[in-house]
Amino acid sequence: MTTISVPGTTVQCRRPTPAVRSAGRERVDPAVPERRVGTRSSGAPRAAVLPRRRRTSRSLTGARALPPFVEEIPAFLVNPSPGLVPAAAANTVVFTGGIKVLLKGLTWPGVINSWFLGTTVMAAFGVRGYALVCLYFVFGSAVTKIKLEQKQAEGIAEARGGRRGVGSVWGSGIAGIACACLALAGVGPGENLWRLGFVASFCSKLSDTTASEVGKAYGKTTYMSTPPFRSVPRGTEGAVSLEGTVAGIGASLGFAGVAAAAGQVDLTGALIATLAAFVATTAESWLGATTQGEAGFEWLTNDVVNAVQITLAAAVAVALGAAVGCG
């Protein structure tokens, strides 16, 4: 609006609204204020008001928050007993990513059954307990393949090229699963003693596997483990060799040492687990020499004998641990 003052007369003229040219046509931009030019009542010229330029503001975006499950991973890794649901999820991820490695040592049914073993152990004894089972699997599979062609030629190698099936999985892990389930259920004598039993069971099984496979590969003289300790061919059930026995004890000590380093047991517990493993493997050799394969005991297969062995190892360890106050 423009105001023109003439003596005796006041004339007001409306200034056209500023337009914006777009695509050959003019359109009115209502957001742009009009210019105002005029005079004050005193006759002094009024300052022109120019349209203000729009200021664009940058939108500041903060750092995205991590998904809740990612934030909980550090706590999960150090949790000594994370529970079944987180353990099942984590174990599924591990199995999915490592399926090719698993199938080198297990059949498909063996993989499926070992998933239950891994999930239960992780739920009760945490990632570190789970790592011990992985160590057993890797080391046990490796020693099974020592001089595999020689053992196959002699007819004393494991079936399927050393790949373990369902029976072998349960024969190796049923005691560990039992200890894990009892720990999850809160059954006495206490979680620490069940953890000790779990470690002892795998100490015993790894010792047995190592002694057997090394003995079949390198044993020069093999004897029955019962009187009169006669010499027998390598691979005979219940037979032992010096090479295999030393290797088995070494494997048991090494496994117990790793368990102690991982915080699953203390030094006393590691020694108890090693002793319990030796007692159980000796009993397994005796059982294989005197009963396995005999008439009326056809049901006493190698997998059943292994299950008895690791259960005995766990029981001895729990009893000794309770006696010395490990729990």
Image: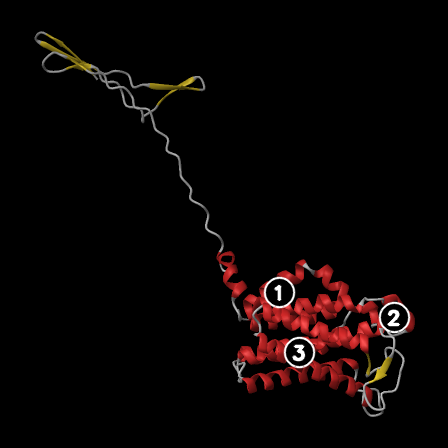
Q: Which mark identifies residue 274?
A: 3
Residue 304's quadrant in the figure? Answer: bottom right
- Answer few, some or many: residues within 10 Å of disc 1's Cα (few below 14, many 20 plus, some between 14 and 19): many
Q: Picture quarter containing residue 106?
A: bottom right
Badge 1 marks a residue whose secondary structure is: helix
Q: Which of the two labelled residues, at mark 2 and mark 3, occupies the earlier sequence position?
A: 2
Please state which of the two labelled residues, at mark 2 or mark 1, is closer to the viewer.
Answer: 2
Q: Nearer the viewer, residue 61 or 162?
A: 162
Tell me which residue sits at (59%, 71%) in the image: 260
Q: In the rendering, which numbered label is found on residue 91?
A: 1
- Image quadrant in which you'd find residue 218: bottom right
Q: Which residue is mark 2?
A: 151
Label located before the other in sequence (3 or 1): 1
Decide: few, some or many residues near mark 3? Use Cα within 10 Å; few <14, some 14-19, many ≥20: many
Amino acid carrying mark 2 in the image? Lys
- Point 27% across, 19% down: residue: 50
